[in-house]
Amino acid sequence: MATPPNNRPNGYILQQLRQQQEQMEFDGKRLRKAIARKTVDHNTSMVKYLQSRIHKRCPFIQPDIGYSLNILPAIARQNPMECVTTKFVRTSTNKMRCPIFCLAWTPEGRRLITGASSGELTLWNGLTFNFETILQAHDSPIRCMSWTNTDSWLVSADHGGYVKYWQSNMNNVKMFQAHKEAIRAISFSPTDKKFVTCSDDSTVRLWDFQTCNEEAVLRGHGADVKSVDWHPTKSLLISGSKDNQQPVKLWDARTKRSLATIHAHKNAVTDVKWNKLNGNWLITSSRDHTIKLFDLRNLNQEVQVFKGHKKESCCLKWHPIHEGLFASGGADGYVYFWHVGSVEEVGIIKQAHDQLIWCIDWHPLGHILTTGSNDHTCKFWTRNRPGDKMTDKYNLQINMKQSDEGIVTDKRGSLSEESAIPGLEL
């Protein structure tokens, strides 16, 4: 007969308590169910940072060719002065010597395409800068070209007003006449469904890319329209012309109306460019030797005026990586480098060309600058490397002078840290 629970001896109760306690304690032998735990480990990033860090007192690359491996691409650095490309690399010239009116890098940066007054498109290697191929693209001088934002199509325009579509393999698939006079610039909408052209017939025209139908004719300039650019994200157009009364105009691509007129220059406007990185800044260059920066949020007054060109400023190009850096080419063959906020130019290539510079463009990675000129040449410029001699006629001019003791100083006489290895600060 079983013993009632209340009448069980104390020894039995103690034994049951011990068994329950042992079950609650982990003896190191039983296997538990695996649990997936999320982990955020900072050690890998810190170890990589410590390995890549340069353990030395001097924050600059040492002036020796052996330190060239320490140079990082433009996208990896925050200092825009590292992309002041004043080192001459190569001069490229067609067999038939003629002015270079426009040029454009392929989206992946492997080749440079130049358009000449002979109507030829020439492809140059982007690594060795040698000639690759040439084709007779137009019957008249090629005045401008532009890639779509998707990098799938290249559109070129000539002095006769004709526009041609090119695939990435340089296969021509379409041609039509957009203007009766020379086309000076082409720019695509953010969606690539539309594009805009400007011409010496004093008009700006809006086109459907797929059907080649003209959607609007924007009239307002009283003279040749030299440049036009589409906003990187909005339906806004900016155009510049020779008309002193209405030199710069802002257009709405949807309503086809003029939104504002900027009376900023005393002479013809040669080029206008939106800043693709922030969408708020726009720069204009003029034959009055000045370049002016405006903010879209307040067009009543310029943000900054860049003075330095001895003759007219002909072309502009924002740097693809650094927001405030841009380059300009002048009628005297000089190339200037500017940075927003800097009073003077941050770099200059004196006598880069013997004649007027028609076009200028950055490599997609921002480490090479190319210029095309009326002297029949296309030139490549890059960053200075450790150990380079700074005495050649093309090299860096960052407002520096050398004291009697041989110390490089800036104009104020203080020791310039940025001049240790100009353009290569780490």
Image (cartoon, helix red, strand yellow):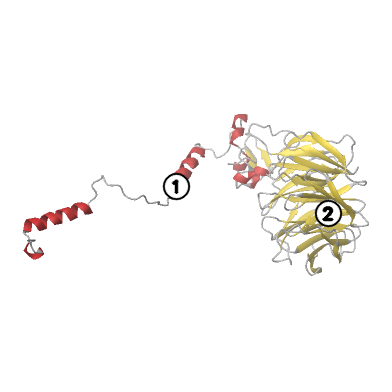
- Identify the residue shown where x is 79% and y is 70%: 255
Which quadrant would the C terminus be assigned to in this image?
top right
* Disc 2 residue crowd, few under 14, some 14–19, many 20+, Cα 10 Å: many
Assign a secondary structure to mark 1: loop
Please state which of residues 149 and 319 is positioned toward the viewer in this rendering. 149
Up-down relation of residue 123 to residue 190 (above or below) = above
Element on which disc 2 rests: strand
Residue at position x 44%, y 44% in the image = 43
Residue 73, numbered circle: none
Q: Nearer the viewer, residue 323 or 16?
A: 16
Vertical position of residue 315 compared to residue 243: above or below: above
Quarter residue 292 falls in: bottom right
The picture places residue 276, in percent across and down from the top left corner, at: 70, 55
Q: Amino acid at mark 1?
A: His
Please name the residue that numbered disc 2 is placed on. Answer: 185
Image quadrant holding the N terminus, namely bottom left
Q: Is residue 375 visible?
A: no
Front-most of residues 114 and 202: 114
- Residue beneath label 1, please? 42
Q: Amino acid at mark 2?
A: Ala
Instruction: Say whether marks 1 and 2 touch (CB < 8 Å).
Output: no
Q: Residues within 10 Å of mark 1 (few under 14, many from 20)?
A: few
Percent coordinates x, y for residue 113 in the rendering: 80, 42
| 21 on left or right of 419 | left
Cα distance between the residues tagged 1 and 2: 50 Å
Number of marks drawn: 2
Tell me if 35 is positioned left or right of 133 in this view: left
In the visual, does 30 lie left or right of 159? left
The answer to whether residue 351 is above or below residue 312 is: above
